[in-house]
Amino acid sequence: MARRAILATAAVVGLILPLAATASGQEYLIGVATRILILALAGLSLNLILGYGGMVSFGHAAFFGVGAYAVAILAYHDTMGEPVLTWPIELAGTQSAFVAWPAAMLISALFALVVGAISLRTGGLYFIMITLAFAQMLFFFFVGLETYGGDDGLSLWARSSAGPLDLGDPATFYYLTLGLVALVLGFKARLVAARFGLALQGIRDNEQRMRALGFATLRYKLAAFVLAGAVAGLAGALMANHSEFVSPALLSWQRSGEMLVIVILGGMGTVYGPVAGAIVFFTLEELLSQWTTHWMIVLGPLLVLVVLYAKRGLWGLVEDASRARPLPGKEERRGEPAS
Amino acid sequence: MSTALLDIAGLTKAYGAVIACDHVSLTIAPGEVHALIGPNGAGKTTLIAQIAGERLPDSGRIVLDGHDITRLPVHARARRGLGRSFQVASIFPRLSVLDNVALAVQAHAGHSFGFWRPARRDEALRGPARATLARVGLAARAEALAAALAHGEQRQLELAMALAGAPRLLLLDEPTAGMGPTDTARMIALLNELKGDVAILLVEHDMDAVFALADRISVMVYGRLIATGTPAAVRADPEVRRAYLGEDEVA
Ligand SMILES: Nc1ncnc2c1ncn2[C@@H]1O[C@H](COP(=O)(O)OP(=O)(O)OP(=O)(O)O)[C@@H](O)[C@H]1O
Ligand SMILES: [Mg+2]
């Protein structure tokens, strides 16, 4: 049916894209596709809290940016031969993906823990404003961080080293990104159908009811928030490598808004929605911006239509079209880690 | 009274100048059906919300089964055996009916930090959830979207969710509110079946239901309990007659 056909096509296109791009002499497409996948990853992490947890975070780019800066700063110190920290422990820089990327996830997760612990007690508009405020604080923190380029940002000398893999090769980096997106998709598909995922959806639907049933809801929201922060940090680490450059713009509120748009367009609370959203959003941007700089004139109304008529976004439409019985209880498919 | 399941003493709660709950003392024995009646705005929902933990009292004490729960958070009280329904049906609209009840089972099945095993294939959750749905007569609707249920069915679902945690005390805030006569009759029959298994604090405006179900009745007016006793005693109480029950209902 429609859903399977689209997933199969996407998997095939995803796998042969570098080959096709190289064969047709359009290598730049590999980079374009890599960027879309990285932002899809960021969208997947936001969807966990937004689509499944009902937490409208307007500061998700902060965790993305922190992950990117973590990789860039570690690499900078490695290149300069200066330790990142001398106290309380001496900590050297590194270019290794096996160290820097998990470190990026960990640091983003810690930031999410702090932001979440403070902001998750509130809801609705307050939560939106507090997450935005935290992201803006971090934005200006990095703007003021002259050691690491401040406003101008910081360039990486090279992409992270990853054992036998040469991440400087566009196709290799693309496949690694694709693999990570598939991994996260698969994990998320399991997660949202597991006890934790159902608890999260219960909180999204009716938090008061969840408490009355006996759930300590804050704990589950915070766990989801931290998990989403970690995955956003991974996406940031990839983005730092992809552009070989980081700057405060990564944490801007526009970037947070873009992530919200990807998720809402693709489908809040659907497993594949954010990937679909990222593909449609950036493909449209790519195509339309060749015609006009005012490409938002097309995308804006499209988004309004989706919000008004397709609450579960484009992927929700696909799922509805390919479902024999429109029952949520039957949604329990296993994660198919195709992209 | 040490044998009481619930023992409330001197519970007071004010909203600004309005004293919604004025030194309320009340006990409920294990298995007792205790009806709480009173005119609109008397403070019935406020009392339930304090027992459930959604509102904290200004003063007073709530003891459940010998443990002081006055300051416990909502979820901790639920885990100690409080189940509740809300005056306006409170469900998970975007989940299936079975999911709704399975979540109630899950709440009492340890923590929910399960990230991998599919919860919808977990018989330890689904089995009891299906059994509870059957108990309230909703088995046929298990796969429906909760939001698609008729009003009366949503109330039944709420009762199933409250029951699924095997509570010792059910707090039911107008379980028949907004129901037609058929649904009301069914709900009352359902509550009648529960009688004896679980203690119930029942807020209800339907006097026939109250007098048919209750072991004891408390009457609340302007935040104060003006009478507590058996249905016959309350029916005969002159102050209750004056303050609340119209002559037609007392006949
Ligand atoms: N959150 C609140 N803020 C201010 N006043 C409130 C609040 N909740 C309730 N009240 C007031 O407290 C009083 C008791 O309200 P409550 O809802 O407990 O009454 P009730 O007996 O449940 O009424 P009903 O039969 O209409 O459900 C009312 O005067 C009400 O206006
Ligand atoms: Mg009320």
Image (spheres, coloured by chain):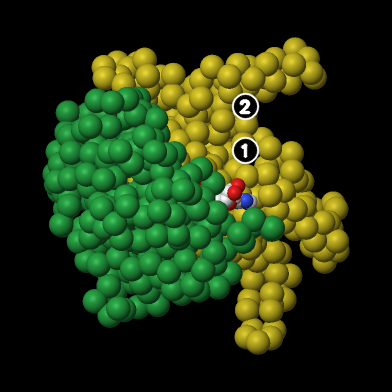
Residue, disc 2: A282
Q: Which mark is residue A259?
A: 1
**Residues at circles 2 and 1 in contact by the CB criterion of under 8 Å:** no
Figure quadrant of the C terminus of chain B: top left
Residue A48 visible (yes or no): no
Colour applied to chain B: green
x%, y% of residue A89?
A: 62, 85
From the rendered image, report the letter of the chain displayed in yellow.
Answer: A
Observer-nearest of A120 and B72: B72
Location of residue A243 with respect to A73 vertically, above or below: above
x%, y% of residue A233?
A: 57, 54
Observer-nearest of A138 and B88: B88
Q: Is residue A269 left or right of residue A4?
A: right
Figure quadrant of the N terminus of chain B: bottom left
Q: Amino acid at mark 2?
A: Phe
Helix, strand or loop at label 1? It is helix
- Say which chain tag 1 marks: A
Residue at point 64% right, 84% down? A90
Residue at point 31% right, 21% down? A326
